[in-house]
Every structure is written in structure tokens, then in C-alpha cells.
Amino acid sequence: MKRGYDLHVHSNVSDGALKPAEVVQRAVEVELAGIALCDHDATAGFDEAREAGEQLGLEVILGCELSAQLDEHSVHMLAYGMDPTHPRWVEELQWIRDDREVRAAAIVEKLNAAGVPITMDMVRAAAGGPSIGRPHIAAAMVSIGIIEKTPQAFTEEWIADGGACYVGKRVLDPVSSVQLIREAGGVCVMAHPIWLDTAGVDADQLIDSCAAAGMAGLEVHHPEHDPEVTARFQRVADELGLIATGSSDFHGNEHGGAIGVHRTQRASLDALLARRPARDV
């Protein structure tokens, strides 16, 4: 029997390995009821995924993983049910994607100076779409044998936050991201809050600030959350009245977990979507 929703999966529209329709097929194989396609700063894969879902009996929810930043540290905000044609949403995402190209070129330049002979053409080929990110730079490094697997690029030596070849983003701060998502009629969940701890950010304070701005949920169940971390963020969600979600962060490659490894039940999904701001009629 089908059960549960994986509310955080990626396709090759951003840094996933599979086409949107192939992601849907994987979800069907593990008997999910539905997925939210949450490519980085892009929704271009949604129509393909929805069509495949209609054919295979899988619900596909419109989502996006919006890039944000706090003091040079990456924070990722999941958006669900927003209007992808909302003027400010379109403007901000285009701005973020345009800067991705500029940022990638600057990182490549730093890598070249450090003796890594990759090119932007190699990075674009790895991306295969409009949303270029550090995983595509890492893939280019793998292709010439500098590293064996893409996660090895995310170190202080290379392109981790604050690393020797790191270049910061031009993106919104997390609270402004919550406000943008709500302005576009969507609902916001903070992704993998363990990343805040890893970056040295005060997770509790940031989650509290985002909740006060209208954030509706927290990704409590995630492949990088061990039982202790999961219990901790469940307590935070309960204290702030946030909906706890479960997701795989599936990419189909070395990043994320197996699709469906963590699931959100329908009642929680309904409660989450019910927190979307009322739209003018």
C-alpha cells in the first residue's frame, strides 16, 4: 500500500542525477503516495514530474529549495504551494540563478589558481540546466581526477563554506526568504537544520526568528539527522508550533538519502499546506 510523502527530492533541473519523470518512477517503486520536487532555485521540472505522476498515480507537489545565507553560511528554505508566476518570486529566482553563474565562474577562477584545471564549460556540462551549483563544480573536479567523489570537494581546502576556493552567494537572508515565499502564496519549511550546527550558526535563534516571520515547518527527519538530532529538532518544532516534516533530500547520486527513507504523513502535509497565506480573490 502506498503511504507517505517525501517532501524534498531533486532532479537534474538542479543538482540531481535523474530527470523529473525518472524521479517520479523511483518514488512509485518505493510506494510513496507523493513527492515534492524541490530543485534548487528552480521549478522548471514540475510540469514533467506532474505529468509522469498523473500517468503513474503519484501526487507531485510544487516545491523549491530556495537558497539563503546568514553571515556567509548557507541556509536552505523549502517552499511549497507557491505561485511560480508571482512577479517578485520570478524576479528573485532569476536574480539568484544569474548570480549562480557569476559565482561559479569566480570559484572556478580560484580553483584554477590552486592548480585545478577545470573550466566553466565543464561545469555547465555537469549542470545540464539553468541552476548551476557547487555540486556541479565538484563533478567537474571528479571528471579530471582531482577528487574521487563529489562530497570530497566540500572541505576547507576546496569549496566548503569558508573554504580556500569558496565564494559567497548574493541571496536573501533566511527571514526575507520566508517573507518572499509567503508573498508568493506558499508555505516555508527550513531544510536540514543540522547544517546550521555544522556551520556554527545558532540554530535555535534562527529557527525562532524564521518562525516569528511565518515559517510553518521544520525538516526534522532527514538522512543527516541521527536519533539525538531528530529528537532535538522535534522538541524545537513542538515548542514553536512548527509542523515536523520527513524527507530524503534525494539526489540520485552521492548526495542525500534514498528516496522515501523519511516520509511525511498526509495529515501533516495537509496541516502544512493549510498554513499558506490567504490569497486575494
Image (tube, rainbow, N blue to C red):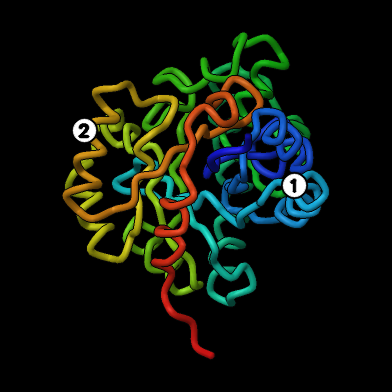
Residue 260 in sight here: yes
**Amino acid marked by disc 1:** Gly
Question: Spatial distance from mark 1 to mark 2, Cα to Cα?
Answer: 35 Å
Report the side of 264 relative to 234 (left or right).
right
Report the side of 68 relative to 130 (left or right).
left
Which quadrant of the structure image shows residue 198? top left
Q: Nearer the viewer, residue 98 or 87?
A: 87
Q: Position of residue 181 (x, y in %)?
A: 46, 65
Determine the residue located farthest toward the bottom in the rendered image. 281
Instruction: Check the image and report above or below for 95 versus 242.
Output: below
Residue 41: mark in rendering: none
Q: Position of residue 26 (x, y in %)?
A: 71, 31
Upstream in sequence: badge 1 or badge 2: 1
Task: Give the residue drawn at x 46%, y 39%.
Answer: 167
Q: Position of residue 279 (x, y in %)?
A: 49, 82
The kind of secondary structure element at disc 2 is helix
Image quarter in which the C terminus is found: bottom right
Residue 91 in sight here: no
Residue 57: mark in rendering: 1
**Amino acid marked by disc 2:** Arg
Q: Nearer the viewer, residue 132 or 17?
A: 17
Residue 232: mark in rendering: 2
Task: Give the residue drawn at x 58%, y 70%.
Answer: 83
Instruction: Check the image and report above or below for 148 versus 169.
Output: above
Which quadrant of the structure image shows residue 93? bottom right
Mark 1 or 2, closer to the camera = 1
Instruction: Check the image and report above or below for 185 versus 193.
Output: below
The kind of secondary structure element at disc 1 is loop
